[in-house]
Image (tube, grey):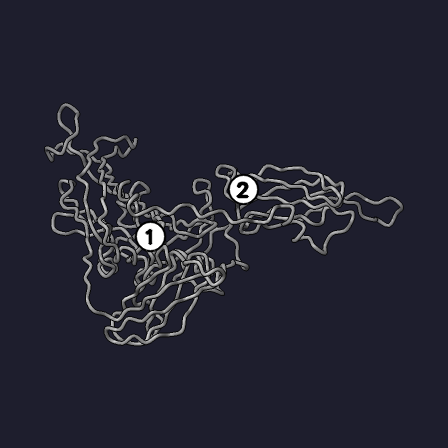
Amino acid sequence: MRRFRLPTSACRLCALTLVVVPTTRTAAQTLIGVVRTREDLRPAVGAIVVLTDSSNRPVAGDVADSVGHFSVRAPRAGRYGVRVERIGLRAVVAPPIALGAGQSVDLPIDVATETVALHRVRIDADSRCDVRPREGTPGELAAWLWDEARKALTATRVSDTKRTTPIEITDVVRWLDPRTGRVLREETLPVARVRGQPFASVSPESLAAHGYVEEHGDSTVYAAPDAATLLDARFLDQHCLAARASRDDRPGLVGLAFRPARGTSRPDVSGVLWLDASSFELRFLEFGYTAPDSLANPEYGGRVDFTRLHDGRWIVRRWALRVPGALNRSATGSTSLGARRRSVPAIREEIQEVSPASLATLGVAAPAPAAQLPSLDSLARLACAGSTSDSTGLVAGIARHGATGVPVAGAEVEAEWLGFVSGGGATPRAEPISMTLHTDRDGRFALCAAPGGALVTLTARFGDRLRSAPEIVRAVRGVVTPLELLIRGQ
């Protein structure tokens, strides 16, 4: 993305450049084809087709469009592996293929729809921070989340390099009062019209060597992580990753945090990639600076918003950055960019985003149609088959976030009721009985063990901060009692 160059003396904007990646067309070895779903032969819109070298490193890729077409240009003639990735689904590896110089090979690919299931871990707590976490280790949840975020970042990078449609970028600069956040001055810059990659950071090589804040003569360059940065091996070697549980102010999202793995004298960044907790699509990135000390302030940093288009490709639709600045104030108290000696501290905020007209031209993806899930009644009878009797009552429910209505996967549901056990005497003894259930990926749960007629108290919780109010229902023999639990911040 674009980077700031601020003179260290006057703290005003010196140069702000858009990076445009030209597209060239030359004869090359190309893999073309269509990706379809094996079950119904529909186009696998948004599937990422990746060519890999002999070391399984990606060397080129493309995103399947609205009809499943892809076209990948290999860097040179040779034998390549072919991998197809889709967000939230398991990757599919096709047989290796040989591409001769200047050759075009057609390879149709059918992929099965197999969801990735986190059967050993739950997203209900913050995890440890590991460099390059792997499956089968305490950091496997972070490894899994990174794999999903990586797919969206790869698709964004590929989409940028192949885009030929001009994009209009709007640009607003504000100066804010550091104490109150009040806008002191606002300036709308001319709309920029670009092709290819509209937002680009400093090269990963430079960031690894010099850090994210660098002095150039009388200017200071403030850099931010973009897709190329996050996908670079040096970034992954120098930063650790950790899963972050959903928060009250991030309902329906799960986070993947990153921070410097070890002490460094270079200016660095930390942040969180926020993914949709149901589809695991990447929504946005928040980041801040960890050094120098003058920038290690929550007021400084930025945010990058990602969007999937209707044809399956991805785009950065909005980008914002806040850094230290100054605004010149006249003797009358008004603000301007005038005399240097009268400058006052301010937070400089710049927001760039794709214009509504360009978004309409590109096409923003419509929400995916809701899956036809089984009813709560069907769910309970299927889940409890073989574990009930004529005297058992069934309770089936769904846990939702109270503010958004989003189903909460991996929530704990505590069920309590009063049971009667034989104490050795003629009269049974009443004792409280409790059971812990867990919601599935659609936020649903089923209680199979409650005796008919019992009053059952159910409470759902997610992590340490989200909890529902207790709900009391009566278990009725042979009947499924529906229930909805609304989880809210405590």
Q: Earlier in the sequence, mark 1 or mark 2?
A: 1
Task: State the separation of the CA atoms marked 1 and 2.
Answer: 29 Å
- Residue 379 appearing in the image: yes
Give the x, y percent position of residue 333.
17, 25
Give the x, y percent position of residue 400.
54, 42
Residue holding disc 2: 400
- Is the residue 60 above or below the residue 1 in the image? below
Disc 1 marks a residue whose amino acid type is Trp
Label 2, residues with CA under 10 Å away: few <14, some 14-19, many ≥20: many
- Give the structural element (helix, strand or loop) at label 1: strand
Left or right, 455 with reference to 402: right
| Towards the viewer: 437 or 51 | 51
Label 1, residues with CA under 10 Å away: few <14, some 14-19, many ≥20: many
Give the x, y percent position of residue 131.
39, 61
- Extreme residue toward the top, this view: 332
Residue 374, which numbered label? none
- Is the residue 118 above or below the residue 101 in the image? above
Disc 2 marks a residue whose amino acid type is Arg
> Viewer-nearest of labels 1 and 2?
1
- Give the structural element (helix, strand or loop) at label 2: strand
Left or right, 106 with reference to 396: left
| Towards the viewer: 197 or 98 | 98
Residue holding disc 1: 314
The answer to whether marks 1 and 2 mark residues whose Cβ atoms lie closer than 8 Å is no
